[in-house]
Image (cartoon, rainbow, N blue to C red):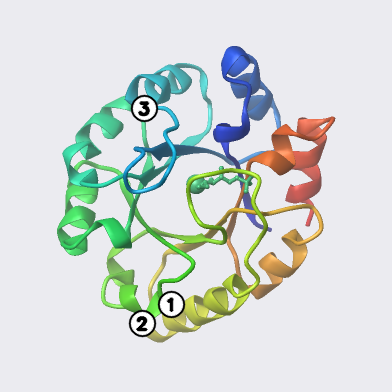
Amino acid sequence: MALIAPSMLSADFLNLSRDVEMVNASEADWFHLDIMDGRFVPNISYGIPVVAAMNREAKKTLDVHLMIEEPGKYAEDFQKAGAEYLSVHIEACPHLHRNIQQIKNLGMKAGVAINPHTNVNQMFDVVKDIDLVCLMSVNPGFGGQKFIQNTLNKIKQLVEERARQGANFLIEIDGGVTLDNASEIIAAGADVLVAGSTVFKSDNPTQTIAELKAK
Ligand code: DX5
Ligand code: ZN
């Protein structure tokens, strides 16, 4: 059974407290929080004070996905704001191993996010050091995009490499997850499903989370 992580990027920011409570009371496992800087990705979302505010009310793990350049500058701020998992993009980190050690030294679980065009073999030398791979199944920056089908091959490659190295990371799929494709994504080997618009644009977000969880 996969973990479900609603992406708060698609929440109603004017009613954030209500939406956090909805996730608290639902079958969701984590909160997925998308941080965008307008440089690494062509969009700006929300920042550290908003994460800290959600953390005051959230009763589940905060999974923070940094789509920013120079993430090492802000890792400690996100730890203080309540991040339990902190993911940095492989494409933004020329010294990825150092970023991973920094995150772990701060007491967080370390994640590495990877864009659709980047081959997963680029992270094989660090997979034993990390807790999460955030496999982007859309180009990062926006919610509501279409799932890129090649992601299923990338999941399978990661599953094989995890077994080969005896590594323990979770495989998280981020972008374009729907009630229609969740089953095949889980069947390919995903451990965590992020879902933004599928949850928050539905008539009954609590029930949609339950339906994802039942896949
Ligand atoms: C995209 C973000 C995703 C996004 C997913 O850049 O990383 O987490 O919120 O949104 P949906 O589920 O609508 O594709
Ligand atoms: Zn994300």
Real-space Cα distance between discs 2 and 3? Answer: 36 Å
* Residue drawn at (44%, 23%) of the image: 55
Give the mark nearest the N terminus, 2 or 3.
3
Left or right: 215, with 175 as reference point? right
Q: Quadrant of residue 107?
A: top left
Q: Quadrant of residue 184?
A: bottom right
| Amino acid at dot 2 | Gln
* Residue drawn at (42%, 64%) of the image: 169
Res 162 label: 1
Q: Secondary structure at mark 1?
A: helix
Real-space Cα distance between discs 3 and 1? Answer: 32 Å
Cβ of mark 1 under 8 A from ligand 2: no
Residue at the spot of label 2: 165
Task: Give the mark toward the camera: 2 or 3.
Answer: 3
Q: Secondary structure at mark 3?
A: loop
User: Badge 1 local density, few (<14 within 10 Å), some, or many (20+)?
Assistant: some
Query: Where is residue 11 drawn, in percent x and y?
Result: 62, 27
Give the mark nearest the N terminus, 3 or 1.
3
* Residue drawn at (72%, 38%) of the image: 199
Real-space Cα distance between discs 2 and 1? Answer: 5 Å
Asked if marks 2 and 1 touch (Cβ < 8 Å), the reply is yes
Q: How many marks?
A: 3
